[in-house]
Image: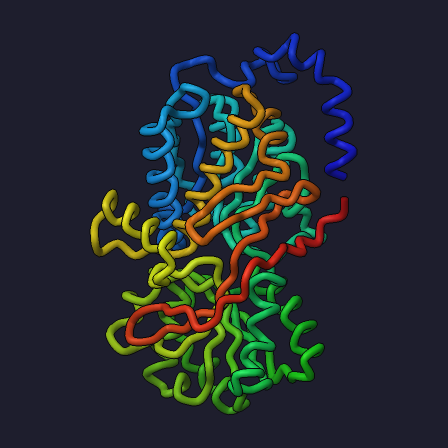
Amino acid sequence: MLRLQRRKFLATAGATTLAAAVSPLGFPAIAQGATVKVGAALPFSGGLELFGQQARLGLDLAAAEINASGGILGRDVEILYRDMKTDPKTAAERARELIQREEVMAVVGPITSSARNAMVPVMEGLKTPLLYATNYEGADDSGGGCGRYLFFFNTVPNQDTAPLIPWLAAQGYGDSFYMFGMNYVWPRNMFRAARGVIAATKGTVLGEEYAPAGEKDFTSVIRKISDEGPEILLFALPGADGVTFIKQADEFGLLDQVTVAFLGFSETYLGAFGAGKGENMITGVPFVASDNDPGVADFVGRVRAMHGPDVGISHYVFAHYNALMALKLGLKASGELTREAAVDGMEGLVFDVATGRASIMAEDHHTAMQMYIAKTEDGSLHVVDHLGVVAPKSGCSA
């Protein structure tokens, strides 16, 4: 699909150049002002604001560093933030507003898969890159993971979950699982992917359950999991709901019975659990702030120099920083400030990140990157295994 769209674009390149100032919808493709505008449709309310704030830390640092080094082709970058309120409909509305009214070069965001899927038709219809820097479940029939204007800077299941399950078995944590998550697209599709890996490693799934968003009392499901007796709880309950569950599970004593394999874990959870809670949980991530690798230490130092010495830093900061840097490098490679140039420049881009080298796959716009197994210990997240570069299996068809 992507190759066909690219051929169509190249065949009409001459006509596009002659009409570069005007889009097919009759408004300027990119504003000719003093800055390169980039929209950011992120949750700053509605339950996932923790992730929206983490994304903002990375974007703010990237924008500051880009501008300090001469901007993008001589122009400063300007981030226009919009709260999509953890709501898919609002996310689509904010994307349309940013493109049509503000004439942004690209949009960064959102966090949830349902919001991303709602934004995709807007991005493709208005031919504007969407830079998605959240770990997600990969392409499926929901249609949210493939297309010329879609770029992905965080992980898919074969990068974070598929290595985690056999690693747990090899380290003696067990091979019997209970899967518990929030009732929406990402947890359901992540567990579907996990079932295949568990079956391939001769493991067993003792139960699978979902909670509605905003649940306050998890006592019944905690008792049910305890009664089933799994060795590993595969957990996909993001945001404040996840924090509430872990606190209640810890108080019940469930975390003494099972190992929590926490999908999409972020270091910013750690302080929210409370002192001594949330220990010995395992996750697969593309970045760990406590890693003593020089590149990681330098990146963490730059974030804290800008935002304060005590700020939590997760892979959401890392991935959103990388997304804006990739946009800059893509435009620089193309040599012009247009949305189509941004797409062409980012396709196949190989660029340096805090953990080493990352590569945007030309065929599906997902990113190959270093991956790690990490564990919560003494109130921090620590690397326990370095997996090396893992290429994405997005599920997109060329």
- Please name the colour scheme applied to the rendered image: rainbow
Q: Is residue 9 in sight in this rendering?
A: yes
Residue at the image position 45 percent from the left and 47 percent from the top:
353
Residue in the foreground of this view, choosing between 374 and 247: 374
Q: Is residue 391 left or right of residue 50?
A: right
- Residue 49, horizontal then vertical, whole percent: 37, 51
In the figure, 75 relative to 203: above or below? above
In the figure, 325 relative to 35: above or below? below
Q: Quadrant of residue 362?
A: top right
Residue at the image position 39 percent from the left and 27 percent from the top:
77
- Residue 260, horizontal then vertical, whole percent: 46, 77
- Residue 47, horizontal then vertical, whole percent: 39, 55
Residue at the image position 34 percent from the left and 38 percent from the top:
60
In the figure, 374 relative to 358: above or below? below
Residue at the image position 61 percent from the left and 47 percent from the top:
366
In the displayed orientation, state which residue is furthest to the top: 18
Q: Is residue 217 left or right of residue 132?
A: left
Q: Is residue 184 in sight in this rendering?
A: no
| Quarter of the image where the N terminus is located | top right
Residue in the foreground of this view, choosing between 332 and 254: 332
